[in-house]
Image: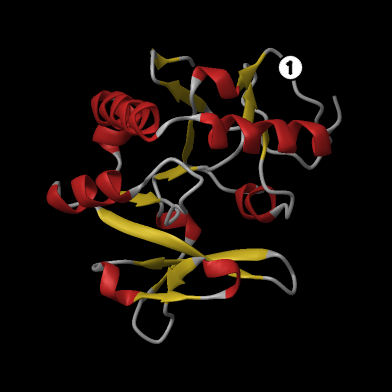
Amino acid sequence: MDKVQLRARGKQIMANFSTEEKNNIEHELAEHLFKSMIFKQASTIGITISQKNEWSTTSIIERAWKEGKRVTVPKCDPGPKYLNFYQLDSFDQLETVYFGLQEPDPSRCEHVNRDTIDLIIVPGLVFDLHGYRIGYGGGFYDRYLSGYKGETVALASKEQVVKNLPHEKFDIPVNHLITEDGYVF
């Protein structure tokens, strides 16, 4: 399968989960993340604001705030297809932009340099056992992660994990993968 087919397959996998299945998997993913050393040791995390068809990130953000962690969320610059992360202290600091995405309002949030982010939770649709991923096709995360020195982790159902994915020289694999069964690597 090529990337377009794999992306479609990943979207279909997410669409096929019942609400109960999705909630159960989200809970397991979050619990495994919370128990991981990479989460425990991180003082600043980068994480997206999830959409309906993605694993919810709300409980992770709330837990990070509760533990006194600094939460940063990305804002997409669609022209150069680049991400900028901003500190989020409240969901009230979000604005709705194109495609219904919720992103930080730069007039109400502080920009955060990527060198100060300890852990980025990288979204995606399909992952392989080497850390490569198929996302939504914009290349935003690969650009941002180029040169990033901190830890990266992806959260995925085991149904979203395959042995190998096609990848190119500019694709950046994640350092860690967690499924509902626990830590994969």
* Residue 150 coordinates in the image, percent (x, y): 47, 42
Residue drawn at the location 71% of the way across and 65% of the way down: 81
User: According to the image, label 1 marks what residue?
Assistant: 164
Question: Does residue 43 appear in this view?
Answer: no
- Residue at x 66% of width, y 56% of height: 140
Q: How many marks?
A: 1
Residue 130 vertical position relative to residue 4 in the rendered view, above or below: above
Relative to 145, say whether 162 is above or below. Answer: above
Residue 147 in the image: above or below residue 171 = below
Residue 39 in the figure: left or right of residue 105: left
Residue 178 image offset from top left, x and y in percent: 43, 23
Residue found at x 47% / y 54%:
51
Q: Position of residue 62 (x, y in %)?
A: 21, 51
The residue lying at 13 percent from left, 50 percent from top is 66
Whole-percent x, y for residue 183 in the image: 40, 16
Residue 71 in view of the camera: yes
Q: Nearer the viewer, residue 122 or 117?
A: 122
Pick whichever, 108 or 41, lies toward us: 108
Secondary structure under the numbered disc 1 in the rendered image: loop
Q: Residues within 10 Å of mark 1 (few under 14, many from 20)?
A: few
In the displayed structure, does residue 110 sit left or right of residue 184?
A: left
